[in-house]
Amino acid sequence: MKKAYTLIEILIVISLISLIYCGTMFTYRNFNKVKKNLDMNFYANNIVLFINKCKSYCKSNGVNGTIQRFEQENGLVFTYNSQRIDTLTLPSDIQIENINIEREKIEISSLGFTSSACTIKLNNCYEKKRVTIEVGTGYTKVKVD
């Protein structure tokens, strides 16, 4: 009767365990990358929705408003007559690099039009995106860097 394991049996078990470990670590890293990219797409599209919602608010109420960067909570804030109407908070791993417009404020007229074109640059550790407002049309869309 055999009472112990042979060296070959032990080596086979250790190699199988190491293969399973390597496979799961590779899958876990790819999962995190896909998750970060999905989060970036989600929040870039949320910014587009937020801007369009603010335009709609200004048009339907006949008021002028502004969207500006809200650094304390890492996001955007929509104000009308110095009153906060709405905010969009982003997670800590997605940062607004800058808003390339004067004073980093997007001004919206009472007709729902933005005063000028601008770009909001976002980044996380895997990718960069830009949310742009185009000249003339005011069309808002997401672009990948």
Image: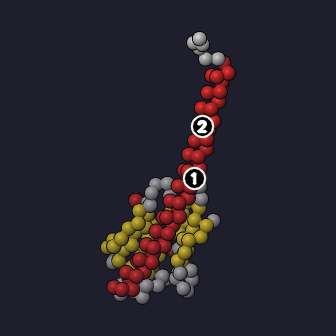
The image position of residue 51, as x and y in percent, is 45, 75
Q: Quadrant of residue 20?
A: top right
Q: Nearer the viewer, residue 35 or 108?
A: 35
Residue drawn at 40 percent across, 59 percent down: 73
Question: Which secondary structure, mark 2?
Answer: helix
User: In percent of the image, x 53 and y 55: which residue is there?
Assistant: 35
What residue is at 36 percent from the left and 86 percent from the top? 60
Q: Which residue is mark 2?
A: 20
Q: Along the horizontal axis of the image, is 18 left or right of 97?
A: right
Using the rendered image of the protein, determine whether residue 88 is visible from the camera's viewpoint.
yes
The picture quadrant where one finds residue 21 is: top right
Q: Secondary structure at mark 1?
A: helix
Which quadrant does the N terminus fall into?
top right
Colouring convention used in this rendered image of the protein? secondary structure
Residue 141 versus residue 12 in the image, above or below: below
Q: Which residue is mark 1?
A: 33
Question: x, y (%) of residue 130?
Answer: 57, 68
Side of 54 relative to 104 (left or right): left
Q: Single out the residue that lies furthest toward the right.
A: 8
User: Is residue 59 toward the left or the right of residue 103 in the image?
Assistant: left
